Amino acid sequence: MNTSITREAALRIGLAARALEVSPRELTLALAEKLDLPLSETKLAGCSVELLREAMDGDGGICVAEKEDLKKAVRLLWGEGVTGSELPRTDAYTDGDMPRSVRLACASNNGEMLDGHFGSCERFLIYQVSADELRLVDVRSTLEADHAEDKNVARSALIADCDVLYVQSIGGPAAAKVIRANVHPVKIPLPGPARDSAVRLQASLASPPPWLARVMGVTPPSLERFARADEDA
């Protein structure tokens, strides 16, 4: 089954879900019952208040929404007032642009904030970080992953090209799946700007702690003198 969703459609669904006070996953599943997968901007543009009401209030409906909330949600699904400002602008990047860099994923729900839990965040912000440069290279919606049989495996696969994951919280089984994807999870309990956390990671690249040195594939500074001693022996 093709469950792919475009960045624009994911943004519309996320904003509509917020207006209805439901999760993006719940709204996606409700819409899929009426519009079929994959959801697209064209299908969302054909959504009506009545269709949305039936999707949400039918058998196993996710809530009973006020008419004004439904109208607002439908306008958002149509794309009215959605300019993409809710999502941060990405920077151009080609593999090899930033030698000796690491790739960081940040769990996010709002703008360029690090404010998400691994199993429920709406998107991952992907940063390429080197000692002298920092770029936001991608924004990846988790809506498609939430249709998978094992959501945590699918979310791990979504960031499998990253080296480090910053997240507000993550359970043990989910963390094990992230590690199995060769990504190092780090809990950042307090929400804040994701770029600030990326800048702190950047500052540590010059003298990385042991866990980060392993990620980078270099010898930790604290062990370098032992490595030099072995070479001189």
Image: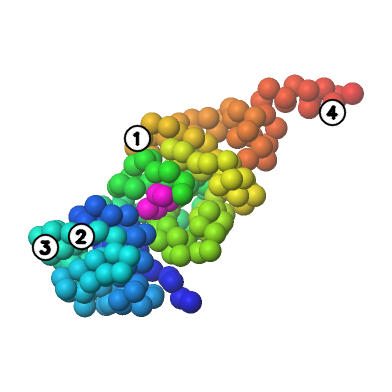
Q: Nearer the viewer, mark 1 or mark 4?
A: 1
Residue 218: % across, % down: 68, 36
Q: Which residue is mark 2?
A: 64
Q: Is mark 2 in CB contact (under 8 Å) with mark 3?
A: no
Q: CA distance from mark 1 to mark 4?
A: 44 Å
Residue shown at the point (26%, 65%) measured from the top left: 56
Disc number placed over residue 66 in the picture, else none:
none
Q: CA distance from mark 4 to mark 3?
A: 74 Å
Is residue 220 positioned above or below 133 on the image? above
Query: Mark 3 or mark 4, which is nearer the start of the sequence?
Result: 3
Report helix, strand or loop for mark 1.
Answer: strand
Q: Nearer the viewer, mark 2 or mark 1?
A: 2
Is residue 12 positioned above or below 221 on the image? below
Residue 201 horizontal side relative to residue 62, left or right: right
Residue 99 horizontal side relative to residue 107, left or right: right
Q: Which residue is mark 1?
A: 192
Write down the quadrant of residue 207 in the picture.
top right
Q: Range of the magenta residues?
A: 120-124
Graded by Cα atoms within 10 Å as few (under 14), some (14 to 19) or many (20 or more), the crowding at tag 3 reads few
Q: Is mark 2 in CB contact (under 8 Å) with mark 1?
A: no
Residue 179: % across, % down: 62, 46
Q: Nearer the viewer, mark 4 or mark 3?
A: 3
Q: CA distance from mark 4 to mark 2?
A: 71 Å
Amino acid type indicated by mark 4? Glu
Q: Which residue is mark 4?
A: 231
Residue 166: % across, % down: 48, 40
